[in-house]
Amino acid sequence: MFAKGTHVRVQDRLIPGHCRTPQYLKGKIGEVIEDTGRWRNPELLAYHKPGLPMARLFRVRFKQADIWGAGYANRIDTLDADLYEHWLERAERPAAQGA
Amino acid sequence: MSMHAPNAAPHHDHDAHGHDDHDHGDHHHAESHLPIEDHDTVTEFHLLEQALRELLIEGGVLSASEIQQQIELQEAKTPALGAKIVARAWSDDGFRARLLADPKATITDMGIDVSHTPALTVLVNGGGVHHVVVCTLCSCYPRMILGVPPAWYKSREYRARVVREPRVVLEEFGVKLPETTEIRVVDSTADLRYLVIPERPAGTAALDEEALAALISRDAMIGTGLAKTPDASAPLSGKA
């Protein structure tokens, strides 16, 4: 459970089969902007299982520069993604995001 | 849709405004006047779809008419529904507040059936933020109010590039935004679908909802376009 404003890192791991966490966000740090509640887990639904236990889904906002590094010139552009709790862990605010 | 050339805009239909790219002169561009032919090439996916469909019908899981009805239902949904919603949100502050707080219930109240469809979140462009929606994992799209997604939305190229270089991709769509506007790419990775409310163009205060709806293209509701200005077919300039 992450409160709005919490910084989270997307876990950098691979799972076999269906996954709703995009590879380009793995290992990246963003900020929780919304808790959308609990949903049937699509990683299980994809295999005709009931999708239980339900998984909490967060909307997470990333700075584009934190995703792509110095190669992304604009400092204010952002990216939002919807990520399930079991892919997130608490993190420190990225250094580059300071100012 | 091809987006290979750096400055080649993906060809997407701006449904409500007139195309002026045909000059009806003598020098026809040969490729644009070739007869439309069916391609006989059957891909593995065609065969797979056909085999699966036949098995489902034979096994009594679905009937051919049920499949046909579902196709018709899908095709009956068009971006006109989304435009109607956006036009009302522009015109009625109370509606807009309700739409943002509870999109599906508010849309249902308008008489648009969004039951049995995924959850919807409404994003508002303006105030220095421009949202653009993508589904990098597949092709999640608010079909219940925008209909079938355009081919380019499902292309690997759009999905890969709009997250990596959104400003370049938006320029190819004809949307140039100042560096001071925050471009917020929204990757529809899971259970939520997204509708963008484009910024209302200046000079539209006197227009009713129907006239406003005509300014709202499908692309404007994905975020790859802007609302059109009332006097011309030209979209609103991105320079705020």
Image: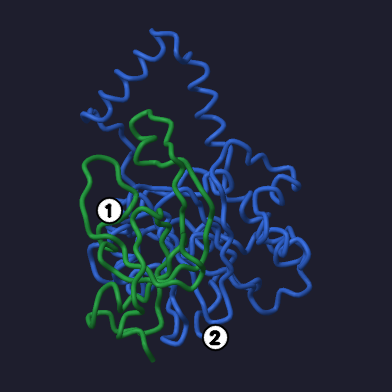
Q: Secondary structure at mark 1?
A: helix
- Residue underneath mark 1: B156
Q: Residue B210 or A88: which is nearer the viewer?
A: A88
Instruction: Give the class, few, some or many, for how many residues have Cα within 10 Å of label 1's Cα (few <14, many ≥20).
Output: some
Q: Amino acid at mark 1?
A: Arg
Provide residue B64's location: percent of width, then percent of height.
Answer: 47, 15
Q: Residue B51 or B225: which is nearer the viewer?
A: B51
Q: Which mark is residue B8?
A: none
Question: Does any portion of residue A13 appear in the rendered image?
Answer: yes
Q: Same chain for the residues at labels 2 and 1, yes or no?
A: yes
Rendered view: A74 above or below B150: below
* Residue drawn where x is 49% and y is 45% of the image: A39
User: Which chain is home to disc 2?
Assistant: B
Q: Residue A50 or B112: which is nearer the viewer?
A: A50
Color encoding of the figure: by chain
Q: Which mark is residue B240?
A: 2
Judging by colour alone, the chain drawn in green in this rendered image is: A
